[in-house]
């Protein structure tokens, strides 16, 4: 059995009797200290805990933005003796190594194994596919195969040609997808967008899901999406959006 707990933004704890995996833990007020009129970063709710309290065995990072690779969350954990490996996209490794001694790199389609868990990195567009000089993608999604469940964690993602087919090939049991979207005005203010609630719902439906779990929609309202819009978009696509409150845990 897999337990899944929502931690806010793109943060989740996936737990079985053998392993505890944390995705994109943003458990600080790092963005809030840089708030401006154009980017009013003000958390809608406080961090639910510290990373140490989650006792992770593995930490997965989708990309290098500070609400995903959060130095203020990660550095105290490792300074206090935390030793869980942190998996980051290969182009982000040199930065992560400055404050995470156990960082290791991930590359698209090169599977990683921890305990009885397989993790398959997938190229991620945020909002476009970007590669470094070595051809490694700067942002990744992950398929997490844990206790016979196949969970697709999107990170900050946008659609690109071939993505739907690739996810279909992975045969996921559950999709964790951003639903905050993007628009002209946020782009002008330097906010990089993700899937909209309509895109997330249609993607989940196209991948054969009856339900998906939205994320990245409720922590910063100016860069979020109303829950009513998420539910309506899911209903229009013939599926359900399972909206979790921060700290809420469900069993899969």
Image (cartoon, rainbow, N blue to C red):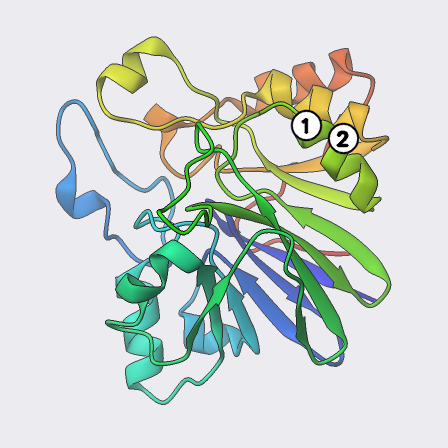
Q: Residues within 10 Å of mark 1 (few under 14, many from 20)?
A: few
* Cα distance in 3D space between marks 1 and 2: 5 Å
Query: Viewer-proximal residue, 212 or 105?
Result: 105
Q: Is residue 48 something one can see in this rendering? A: no
| Quadrant holding the C terminus | bottom right
Query: Going by the image, does 33 lie left or right of 77?
Result: left
Q: How many marks?
A: 2
Q: Which mark is residue 165?
A: 2
Among the 4 quarters of the image, the one containing residue 71: bottom left
Task: Write the residue at 41% across / 39% down.
Answer: 219
Q: Nearer the viewer, residue 219 or 88?
A: 88
Q: Decide if residue 238 is on the left or right side of residue 131.
A: right
Q: Position of residue 81 (x, y in %)?
A: 36, 89
Q: Which mark is residue 162?
A: 1
Question: At 24% across and 36% down in the image, what residue appears?
Answer: 41
Q: Residues within 10 Å of mark 2 (few under 14, many from 20)?
A: few
User: Residue 47's x, y, as percent?
Assistant: 38, 57
Q: Is residue 63 above or below residue 3?
A: above
Give the camera-side residue of 120 and 187: 120
**Label 1 residue SS:** loop
Q: Residue at x 66, y 31 (%)?
A: 163
| Tag 1 near tag 2, CB within 8 Å | yes
Residue 166 in picture, x, y percent from top left: 73, 37
Residue 6: image location, x then y, percent: 57, 52
Residue shown at the point (37%, 55%) measured from the top left:
91
User: Helix, strand or loop at disc 2?
Assistant: helix
- What mark, if any, has residue 175 been given in the picture? none
Residue 76 visible (yes or no): yes
Q: Residue furthest bottom?
A: 81
Question: In which quadrant will I find the N terminus?
Answer: bottom right
């Amino acid at each position: 059995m897999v337990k899944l707990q929502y931690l806010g933004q793109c943060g989740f704890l996936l737990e079985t009797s053998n392993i505890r995996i944390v995705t994109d833990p943003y458990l600080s007020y790092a963005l809030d200290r840089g708030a401006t009129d154009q980017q009013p970063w003000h958390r809608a709710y406080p961090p639910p805990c510290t990373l140490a309290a989650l006792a992770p065995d593995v930490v997965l990072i989708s990309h290098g933005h500070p609400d995903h690779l959060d130095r203020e969350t990660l550095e105290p954990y490792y300074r206090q003796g935390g030793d869980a490996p942190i998996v980051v996209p290969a182009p982000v490794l040199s930065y992560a190594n400055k404050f995470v001694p156990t960082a290791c790199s991930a590359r698209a389609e090169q599977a990683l194994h921890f305990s009885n868990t397989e993790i398959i990195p997938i190229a991620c567009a945020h909002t476009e596919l970007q590669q470094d000089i070595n051809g490694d993608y700067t942002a990744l999604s992950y398929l997490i195969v844990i206790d016979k469940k196949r969970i697709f964690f999107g990170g900050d993602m946008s659609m690109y040609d071939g993505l739907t087919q690739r996810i279909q090939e992975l045969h996921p049991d559950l999709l964790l997808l951003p639903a905050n979207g993007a628009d002209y005005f946020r782009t002008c203010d330097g906010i990089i967008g993700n899937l909209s609630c309509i895109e997330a719902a249609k993607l989940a439906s196209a991948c054969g899901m009856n339900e998906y779990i939205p994320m990245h929609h409720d922590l910063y309202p100016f860069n979020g999406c109303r829950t009513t819009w998420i539910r309506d978009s899911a209903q229009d696509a013939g599926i359900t959006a399972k909206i979790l409150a921060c700290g809420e845990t469900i069993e899969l």
